[in-house]
Amino acid sequence: MGIVKYIRDFAAALFKDAPYTDSMLPQEETAEKEYFLEGRYRVKKLIRETNLSRVYLAESSELEEVVIKHYKYEPLLKREVAAFERIIEKGGHESLVSLVEYSLAERLIIMPKAESDLYALIKVSSSASQRKGLDPRVVYKIACEIGGGLQFMHDLSMVHRDLKTANILLFSKESKYGKREQLKLSAKLADFGCCWFDGAGYLEEPGTPVGTLGLMAPEDLQSSTKSPAADIYSFGLVIYEMIAGRGAYDVFFDFETRIKKRFQPLPENEKIPLKIMKVIQTACEIKPENRHQSQLELVEDLRKALY
C-alpha cells in the first residue's frame, strides 16, 4: 500500500464518529452535564468538543475555576491517568500540566485553568502586528520550558507523540498579549492521551500512526514509533510555527502534497533567519539519527542562533 493511501485511510478512520476504528474503541454515549463529582464542580461553559472528549470550564465548590476533560472512551482516560501517575511518582515537572484530580467512574480528569494556549497566542500576535510570529525572547522562553518538560518525560522513557501548539498551555496572572505580558507567560505541556511508555497499553492497532498528522515525523507516518526522536521532530515544527506565525506545511492545502513533503528536507522560509532555520531543519531531518539527540541540545542550538 502506498504511503499516501495508507495515511488517507488512517485519517478517514480517525475523523469519523468513532476514533481510529469502530472495533478498537466502541461508541459510548455521553450527554452534556451541568455538574460533576456529586456537585463539587459546576460547569460554566463547554470550551470545545471533539470525537474523543468534551472540555468544560467549571467552578469548584471553593469557587476556583478549573478545566474538566470528560472522555467519551474509558481506555483513553486510563492511558492519560497512567501517564499522569508516572510523572507524579517521579516528582512532576514545572513545565508539565498538573492534575487536580480524576474519576474513572465519571471518565474525567480535572486540571488547572490556563489563560490560553500557544496556538491562540500565535494567532493573536500575528493579527495584532505587521510582523508574523512571536518575539524571539518569547520563543526562546517557551522553548526552554517545553524542552525541559519533554526532556523530563524522555528521561522517564516516555514519548509524548502529540506535541503541537494547541497542547502547550499558557499560565499567567496577566490577560493581555503584549510583548511584556508574553514574557510573563509560563508554558506547560498537556494532553498525554497519546503518550507511550512501558505499561501504557495500546489503543491503536500495531503500526497505526498516532498523533496529529500535521506534526508527525516521517517515521510516524509509516508506523507508530516509540522514539523520542519523533518528539524532537515535532518540537522543531512547533518552533517553526512560533517564529513564522503558521505551520510549516499549512501552505500546502492538498492532502497528498502535505504527506509527500514530509519525506523531503524542510524548505527554508524567508521569514525565519537562516541561523534559526538551520536549527529547525536539523530537528526536522528525515532520518531520526540525524536530528538533535535531545531536547536540551535543540534548545541550546536555538539559543546560539537567537543570540
Image: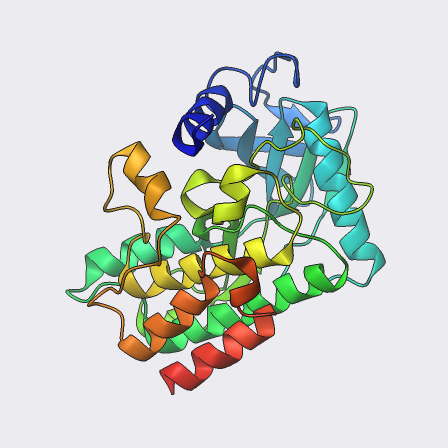
Q: Is residue 89 left or right of residue 21?
A: right
- Which percent across, then down, holds residue 153? 70, 59
Q: Is residue 155 left or right of residue 116?
A: right
- Which percent across, then down, holds residue 150? 62, 62
Q: Is residue 29 left or right of residue 79?
A: left
For the point 43% across and 29% down, the residue is 2
The C terminus lies in quadrant:
bottom left
Q: Residue furthest left?
A: 130
Tell me: residue 25, above or below residue 231.
Answer: above
Between 275 and 103, the one nearer to me in the picture? 275
* Residue 23 showing in the rendered view: yes
Tell me: residue 38, above or below residue 98.
Answer: above
Tell me: residue 135, above or below residue 43.
Answer: below
Q: Which image quarter: residue 4?
A: top left
Between 52 and 234, the one nearer to me in the picture? 234
- Which percent across, then down, holds residue 252? 24, 42
Exactly how many numbered labels are in the figure? 0
* Residue 39 showing in the rendered view: no
For the point 73% across and 24% down, the residue is 106
Q: Which image quarter: residue 33?
A: top right
For the point 51% across and 54% down, the residue is 169
Tell me: residue 103, above or below residue 299.
Answer: above
The image's colouring method is: rainbow
Q: Which image quarter: residue 210?
A: top right
Between 104 and 293, the one nearer to me in the picture? 293
Between 239 and 257, the one nearer to me in the picture? 257
Q: Residue furthest front?
A: 1
- Which percent across, then down, holds residue 266? 34, 58
